[in-house]
Image: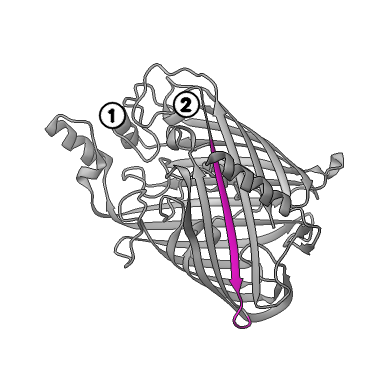
Amino acid sequence: MRCSLMHVFLLTALAFASPATAQTAEGDAAPSVSWPTSWLAVHGQATFTLQGTPGFASPYAGPNSLTPRQRKETIDATVYAGVQPWRGGELWINPEVDQGFGLSGTLGVAGFPSAEAYKVGKKAPYVRLQRLFFRQTLDLGGAEQKTDAGLNQFAGRSTANRIVLTIGKFGVGDVFDTNKFAHDPRNDFLNWALVDAGTFDYAADAWGYSTGVAAEWYQGPWTVRVGAFNLSKVPNGETLERDFSQYQIDAEIEHRHTIGGRDGAVRVTVFRNRGLFGRFDDALALATLIAAPPDTALVRRRQTRMGVSFNLEQALTDTVGLFSRAGLANGQIEPYDFTDIDRTASAGLSIKGDNWGRKADEIGIAAVVNGISKEHQRYLAAGGIGVLVGDGQLPHPGAEAIGEVFYRWAPLRAISLTLDYQIVGNPGYNRDRGPIHVFGVRLHGEL
């Protein structure tokens, strides 16, 4: 089945090499085979990612440890189909075929090396409905802006001042914590803590999507966003709540600016999760009484976990862009739907290939440092298991430090091949393990 699916991917990728083009939001030509009507659009993408790691120091291992000397691959193919029933209204559906596994079943590193690897892996391809949502844009005046056709986006026009309402099933990251230089694991950085703020414990099922509603108000250089989303029924579960009995509230303020004639933006994002969460110290106290490893699942009760993150993007030249994120979340309570990070800071550069005659190519360089609270450290040291990490012990805790560099080669408008390298120091906050070298290849096609 693996070979047959790869053949399908390659055939699809070749089909993406169609010479028909449309303009992207950045103004560059991009392939498009959308219907020529104004009310219907169909696009697609397919991505193959292969990652492997050689041997590294591993004096002991626990249930969530990364294993040395392995390689894993993931494949996904998505259809983006939309209809536009009236001006400003859009209904989109995104069925997707997935297959494969992340390294060690997507375990062992809080800033996991592949955002293309879900928390659920399967050997055989399977179909998921990842998005089904309605979006309405309400013009409020100001300069007219052109919107170009793209994935989950119709070509059209809107005013600079507007309100955008989205309801249904979609990703929290589709609206919040976006960044033009580091937010798309199919085209730029792969690491979880680089494509999103590592502390942003956004509501999601095991594939990264939720159901809810979001509202955006664009006014001049400012945008205010708010949203409400269902959490999963149990932390990192496959099934979402349906009645907001466990929920997340998100709020974000964005300011767009120019410095030296170069575009930039600053965003501050706040989340508030309300549901059945466990406190690390409560789990440790119970573990002492029953003489067992601590388990937050045994002490969950209704409470609140909050966090805040900062997000910067800034064009430095026509070909170089800078991004940075920093975040802090409540480290006394277990993370719910994302990963084991209580504080994070990242920065990086995106360099376009114009300077060496490869306009469509790109180099990315970035680093991120992740940390956890003292309570979180004690929990892992006593044998507790987190969302992605847990070596069974943690005698020498330290910050998780990650570097990533990639080169994305685009020989055709619709196809790109990326070589990716990451180094992870103190994986799972453990100074006794690693450093881990992760080598990756990504093949992506999009129409």
Q: Residue at x 78, y 48 (%)?
A: 412
Q: Where residue 70 is drawn, which disc sits there? A: none
Q: Residue at x 22, y 31 (%)?
A: 293
Q: x, y percentage for residue 66? A: 44, 28
Q: Residue at x 66, y 53 (%)?
A: 180
Q: Is residue 78 magenta?
A: yes
Local secondary structure at mark 2: loop
Local secondary structure at mark 1: loop
In this rendering, position of residue 99 left or right of residue 410 = left
Q: Is residue 410 magenta?
A: no
Q: Residue furthest bottom?
A: 86
The residue pinned by badge 2 equals: 426
In this rendering, position of residue 323 left or right of residue 426 = right
Q: Is residue 247 visible?
A: yes
Q: x, y percentage for residue 55? A: 51, 19
Q: Is residue 323 visible?
A: no
Tally of marks: 2
Measured along the vertical axis of the image, is residue 270 above or below residue 373? below
Front residue of 330/284: it is 284
Q: Quadrant of residue 242?
A: bottom left
Amino acid marked by disc 1: Gly
CA–CA distance between discs 2 and 1? Answer: 17 Å
Examine the residues drawn in magenta and state their main secondary structure.
strand
Q: x, y percentage for residue 86? A: 61, 83
Amino acid marked by disc 2: Asn
Front residue of 46/222: it is 46
Circle 1 packing at 10 Å, graded few (<14), some (14-19), many (20+), is: many
What residue range appears in magenta? 73-87
